[in-house]
Every structure is written in C-alpha cells, then in structure tokens.
Amino acid sequence: MTGMAISLGPLQYFWPRARTLAFYREVAGWPVDVVCLGETVCGKRRELRTAEWIDLAGELAAAGKEVVLAGLALIEAESEVATLARLVGDDRFLVEANDLTAVQLCRERGRGFVAGPALNVYNHKALALLQEDGLRRWVPGVELGLALIEEIRGRHLAAGRRMPPLEVVGHGRLPLAWSARCFTARALDLAKDQCGFRCIEHPDGLPLATREGKPFLRINGVQVQGEEITDLGPELPALRRLGVGLFRVQPRHEGTAEVVAHYARCLSGQAAPVAIGARNGYWHGEQGMVAAGP
Amino acid sequence: MELVSPAGNLPALRAAVAAGADAIYLGFRDQTNARAFPGLNFEGDELRMGLEHAHRHGRRVFLALNTYPDARRLPEWLAAVDRAAELGFDAIIAAEAAVLDHAARHHPRLPRHLSVQGSATSAPALRYAWERFGISRAVLPRVLSLQQVERLCAAAPVPIEVFGFGSLCIMVEGRCQLSSYVTGASPNRHGVCSPARFVEWREHDDGERSVRLNGVLVDRFAQDEPAGYPTVCKGRYQVLGEVFHALEEPTSLNTLALLPKLAAAGVVAIKIEGRQRGVAYVDAVVRTWREAIDRHRADPAGWAARPAWQAALAAQSEGRQTTLGPYHRAWH
C-alpha cells in the first residue's frame, strides 16, 4: 500500500432530504476517494428512497468518487432484506456488508463486498472465510485496535494469504450497539410505530449524560453511539505501517468539510497530524472511551 | 417443544434435570463462553459428572462456546471444540466463524447450534450459517417481534430456538460494545458484560447508594430502592433534561403467555437465560415452564397461562418485573 486516502462513512443520522442532497453535492468536491452511502440505522428513515440513494451514488461516481452502498446493520423484516437485495443487485457499486444477511446476498450473486465494522471479524481465520465469500476490503470493528489487527495480519500473511485492503474508522462517534427498540422514540415518550420520524430533529443524535451531567453516549434511533468524537489522526504513522489504505470520517451535522480538509492536509504532509478529537482507547487495547474520573 | 435450561454449576445442572429440562447448556471455566464469571461454569470431575448425570436421565447437554476468539487465542477455542466432541456433548452453541468452521470440518457429527451471539436475524443470515457451517439449529437474538419470529421460522433453513425467560439483552447480541466502551472487557471477546471488578458501590451519608462502572456513574438509588446489577443498558441517565432508564428498565423477559403462538410458529426449543443464577432459580423457572409446555402439549386448545406460573416466574425476575420484550410490538 503506497498511500492513504480518505473515505466518508455512511450518514448515520437522519437529515431532511434537501439537507442530505446538499451535503453530498458538497462531498463531490471534497478530497475523499471513497463515499459510503445509504441508510444503515433505521428502515423507517425514508427521506431518500432506495432508488434515490442509488441515483446519488451514480452522481458521486460520475464526480470521480468510488461509491460503496451500505444497508441496515440490523435486519428485522423481510422488506429490509428486499431493500438490501436491491443494493446488492446493482452491479455498478460495491456493497458494504454490516450483517451476515448482506454477506449471504452477495455470495448468492457472486459479488464482492466490503466487510463493514458491524461484521464480527476477530481473527485471521474468520477473515480468510470471508475472503472466500467475496470480501474485497475490510473495515475492522470498533473494538479492534492496533495490536489485534497486527496479530490478525501477521497470522494471515504467515498462512500464505493475502491481506485485503484495510479501512479504519478514523474520525467520529463510534457506533456501539443496535436494538429493536428505538431509544429516540423512548426518550420522546413515543411508540416506535408512531415515532413521527423525530430523529430528524436531532441531526447529530440525542446526547445522553450520566446523572452527574457527564456526557456519555449518543442516542441515534435504534443505535447507540459513544459521545466522544474519536480521532485516529495522531496514529497516522502507525496506520501507514499497518498498511491502512482508507481513513474513514463519519459525517456529522457540522464541520465535516473542515475535518476532511484537516486529514487531507495531514495525509499530503502539509500539516502535522495533531489531535482534533478524543483518544480512541480501543485502538490502544483499552476501553473505548477516555477513562472517567470518579 | 424442547426446554433448554442453563446451568452454571453441578447443583444447578442437577436441579435442571430434576425439574424436567430436556437439555442443559453450560460452559467451560474459561473465556470461551459468554458467562465467564468467577466461580461459575464447569471443569474436570464436575464436568464429567454433569454430563454423566444428564445423559443417565436421558437429557442432552450443549456446550456454550459462543465468544469471539482473537487471532492469538483462537487455538484455545478450537481445542475447546475438540474437547466437546471427546467428552460427548450433544451439541455446541457457537457464534464465531472460525470456531464453527473448525467444528464442521473436524467433528461433523457434533451438532452445531448458531448462538444468539451470532446475531442472525434474517433468512439469508441463517442460510449463510447453514450453508457455510452446517448448523442444525439457530438461537434468535432478542430483537424480533412475534410476527417476525413466525415469518423467520417459515423461511429458515434450520429449526429455531428462542429465549423464553430471563435477563433481557435489549441490544443485538454479539454486536454490543457498551461494556467494552466503558471497561475494555466485552461479551464478545471476554465473555463478560460489565464485569464485577469494574463495579463500585458507594453508600452516601443520606443513605443513598451510587454505583459506578469503571468510574462512570450508572445509577443512584434511594435508601430502600431495589438496585439491580449495573450493566450500562440498565442505568438511569439524563436525556433532554430528564433522568430515566433511557435504554431499558431492569426487568426480565417472560414469553410464557406466547407459548401457543411460538409452538404454532414451529419454534423447536425454548431457552431459559441465567447460567449465573442459582439452584432456586433454575428449579423454579424450569419446573414452571415444564408444566406449561406439558399442559400445552396435552391440551393446546384449552391452554392458558396460569396466574400461579406467572407469579412463580415473576418471583425470579429482575426487579420482580417481567416483559414480553421485543416479541410485543408496543415494547419497541
């Protein structure tokens, strides 16, 4: 791997249609090589229909981006399987699999896929099995840090296998859990079936703090994220040594363009990779969040 | 419908057999299973005696081997599969691809159940595990509604087992990082959620108690308020200016009332959660479900959940409360 480029992760929050389209029109001009598109959190979020996500993918591809389509991380209904099948059915774009459902649909069509961070890959053997299934690139799960990935890489290579291209979640809030329950609806005292799509009022999710007021988690519909904006920027030299090819930035309500510009300067050597976010403990083999003082 | 009981030690296993469990699941005393708590699980003579006792009474024994080994520790997990085959377990319950693949290749006659930790919630996901690893049963994560379970039973390539009773994980199992975000120890990698060594209770001058997990305040309790085990998902937090159980109340899953519908859907086994619980729990819960299943089998049309059964189960629940959980649409 010679260089490292920036990828834009899927938009995890729920934004109004016009805002989403405007955001991706801007993205077309950003220094990102890869854009991962699609609704990954909640099947009820339909400001953009599946066909419109695919159209958007076409526009970004025409602007020179490599586009990856992503579906829901938690599949509950047959209609959601059908939506995923439509993404897999479009041969122009790779699909990011964040669930075995997507892996199987790709296998059945003989298509390659990106293994997303919600897919459990904890060792070299699991990685090799997924490569047999069609894995083309690997985004390790958030729990996997440098030492674990190095171990996998070493054993994988020692077994005579090729390491797939690596992409790491470099900047943003880490997705930590998914549920059938919608925590946003719960916080607003609404039934999930009558949620009123209120996630749209919280374009960066809903902050959750401990009872002593310390910011802790971020509620995003059926997903729970860590509150901290993690930043692997200071690890860029180690990422390079590991052979990471893509540094993923998770979109946020504001400031994503500046964040991308910062990493672009770091990657081209124009700026030092100073920290612009929180230390990602997982990367160092510790708890994910910065330790809380008592 | 088969009744599958947990056992964290030999007395619990004996209690499960006596109370009428069809099968018992247990783990080795290491991190290869998702209840790797100190003092729990089986080794040595206890293991052999447990297997022998259950088999003598015509019951089956499953090995929970359902955590995710990292690259360095993988040989330990694969050795556990070999041991399960040698010792004569009736099935392993596993989630991780390398573990399942090893079992399928080297012990094809040892049945493989896909663990709840495998996070398979759709027909294609189940097809994957079936085609790839030849699973003969799958345990569903506790995230699907009854209607979704029914449809999945119809579409699945393998028989389905569901959770009937016990502590309720509200997140998709096998994909929850809340514990590791706070403590570094995860259910997937270390077989523990919110490990006790990170829990710190403190009593305050006003009689209030607070509980922290690795320094993070999970909850505070008034003097006489019942306090449950502080997993991240069952704490009270501030959201939009209010303090409440923002993710989930401390409550237990109880699907007893759904038994006829689960049976009609073709669910082949009901799993009771709780390898960390004692003999009294196993005895009461298994006995109650045994009677309910037997009564249903004898007279499906005349079956109704008896108040005495529900009372017996409620007495074993977290916070003495039970819920139908995700099986019931309104829970969501």
Image (cartoon, coloured by chain):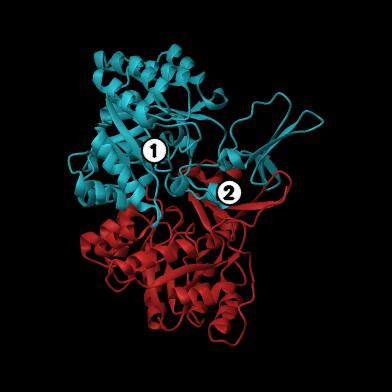
Locate residue A223, reporting x and y percent: 51, 51
**Regarding mark 1 in the picture, which secondary structure is present there?**
loop
Locate residue B236, reporting x and y percent: 64, 39
In percent of the image, x 45 and y 61: which residue is there? A148
- Asked whether A20 or A133 is in front, the reply is A133
What count of labels does the image hold? 2
Task: From this view, report whether residue B285 is shown above or below residue B155.
Answer: above
Q: Amino acid at mark 2?
A: Thr
Locate residue A1, reporting x and y percent: 40, 80
Task: Tell me the crowding category of disc 1: few under 14, some 14 to 19, or many 20 or more residues within 10 angstroms, Cα based.
Answer: many
Figure chain in cyan: B
Numbered disc 1: what chain? B
Q: Which of labels 1 and 2 is toward the front?
A: 2
Task: From this view, report whether residue B295 is shown above or below residue A137.
Answer: above
In percent of the image, x 28 and y 25: which residue is there? B2
Q: Quadrant of residue A199?
A: bottom right
**Is A36 placed left or right of B238 in the picture?**
left
Q: Amino acid at mark 1?
A: Ser
Seen as rendered, the residue at the extreme front is B45
Task: Tell me the crowding category of disc 2: few under 14, some 14 to 19, or many 20 or more residues within 10 angstroms, Cα based.
Answer: many
Q: Can residue A22 be seen from the camera position used here?
A: no
Q: How far is the residue under mark 1 from the one under mark 2?
A: 31 Å
Locate residue A234, reporting x and y percent: 59, 73
| Label drawn at residue A159 | none
The residue singled out by tag 2 in the image is B183
> Both on one chain, marks 1 and 2?
yes
Colour that chain A carries in the picture? red
Numbered disc 2: what chain? B
Q: Can residue B169 be seen from the camera position used here?
A: yes
- Disc nearer the start of the sequence (1/2): 1
| Label drawn at residue B145 | 1
